[in-house]
Amino acid sequence: MVDLRNLRYFVLFDNNLTGQLPKGLYNISSIEEIDVGNNRLNGSFPSDIGLTLPRLSFLRVSNNSFSGLIPPSLSNASTLEEIYFHSNNFTGPIPKDLGRLPQLQVLFFAQNQLQDDLSFIDSLVNCSRLQDIAFGGNFLTGSIPRSLANLSTELSSIDLSENQLSGAIPIGIQHLTGLERMYLYQNFLSGPIQDINFTRLPRLQRLNIGNNHLTGSIPTSIGNLDMLSLVAMNYNNLSGGIPPSLGRCPSLLYLDLSHNNLSGTIAKEVFSQGSPLVVLVLLSNRLTGSLPPEVGLLRNLGALYVSDNKLVGLIPDSIARCIVMEELNLSGNYFAGEIPNALSSLRGLRILDISSNNFSGEIPDFLSSASGLTLLNLSANQLQGEVPRDGVFLNASAVSVFGNSDLCGGISELKLPPCLNSKKKENNLHLEKVF
């Protein structure tokens, strides 16, 4: 028999283990680390685990099928530094006195079935070394307490997303000067956000507050964040214009302001020289004016969505310089003119949707020769002439051309009338005259 009385590390991370942990494990008081994450284990934990394992500093049981309550006695294991309980089936409340763990740095309870409010945060104020907290994907209710602003200045990540939280985002959150990631998306948060001074969060890299009921304007102070790479404020009730200051974020890769009540023109400053922006989503707002020619300055832009606004004018020829563009959606606006040849420079384009606009003229040949095009929507415009029978136009499920009353030809599945004077017939007539 192996003597386990002095066992310090029990590490079985990332295997394919099933069943339950041996009950005797919780009686080995010398254990400092338990790591059984990324398996297929189940069962629950004894209520006194924090008393029987007083030396425990690392506890990871994430990505399994554990259930039951999170033992309140964990607060008695005063040497605990990292707790990972996320991605399981735990139920019930969150222990209220985890602030008794002076060494606590990481607390991950996300993606479970926990039902509670956020009153436990009051206790966490005592954890001066706290760096990461994650409670997203549960059934947490109530408002975000003001005590959140008093958490450790070493805190780098907050995840309260995918819950049922309500009320305002505390303005005091700006006091968490070490914050790098803030995830509050998919709740019922409300109230304005323009009073939050994001300049006081110089390390912020990822900000996702989408899918809420937030109001007011977008704070211009966001433009002062040099490390910011992701901003998602989609599906809210934000109003006002798009702050030109966003163009000053030198690290911004992803910007989603869709499904709000934003108005005014798209400031040319958003398309700043040298911007690394890869994804820009502005769809479903009330934006007016034209698409600024400065869009061509975004050499790394891979996806542009400005559909369902009130934009007018021509597609600027400068868009040809966005040579890595893969997805372009301009639908539901008032763009006009012919489909520009500038789009032929977008060799990697996979999705092109310019439906529900005022485009006119013939379908350009370059669309049928675009080998990577997998979805093309030209419907509800004023296009005319013969629909090609090459490339993407051979796949009726990948092409939509309805609502253009002067189009003809194409494959039979498109159900268009035949062309009376197709290019093919014109060539035949010319040959007959020669011979």
Image (cartoon, rainbow, N blue to C red):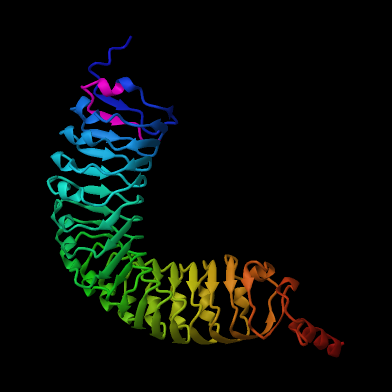
User: Would you say residue 26 sits in the magenta stretch?
Assistant: yes
Residue at position x 20%, y 27% from top? 51
Task: Answer whether residue 124 is visible to the viewer in this image.
Answer: yes
In this rendering, the answer to whether 346 lies above or below 313 is above
In the image, farthest residue toward the bottom:
433
Residue 26's image quarter? top left
Q: Position of residue 200 (x, y in %)?
A: 15, 64
Q: 102 or 213, which is in the foreground?
A: 213
Residue at position x 44%, y 67% from top? 302
Q: 297 or 186, which is in the foreground?
A: 186
Q: Position of residue 18 (x, y in %)?
A: 44, 29
Residue at position x 17%, y 33% from top? 76
Q: Position of residue 134 (x, y in %)?
A: 28, 49
Count of numbered circles in the view = 0
In the image: residue 103, left or right of residue 387 = left
In the image, farthest residue toward the top:
1
Residue at position x 22%, y 17% from top? 6
For the C terminus, give its image quadrant.
Answer: bottom right
Residue 359's image quarter? bottom right
Q: Position of residue 434 (x, y in %)?
A: 84, 89
In this rendering, the answer to whether 57 lies above or below 240 is above
In this rendering, the answer to whether 378 lies above or below 74 is below
In this rendering, the answer to whether 21 lies above or below 136 is above
Task: Answer whether residue 292 is visible to the viewer in this image.
Answer: no
In the image: residue 7, left or right of residue 210 = left
Q: Which residues are magenta?
A: 25-38
In the image: residue 41, left or right of residue 334 = left
Q: 59 or 269, which is in the foreground?
A: 59
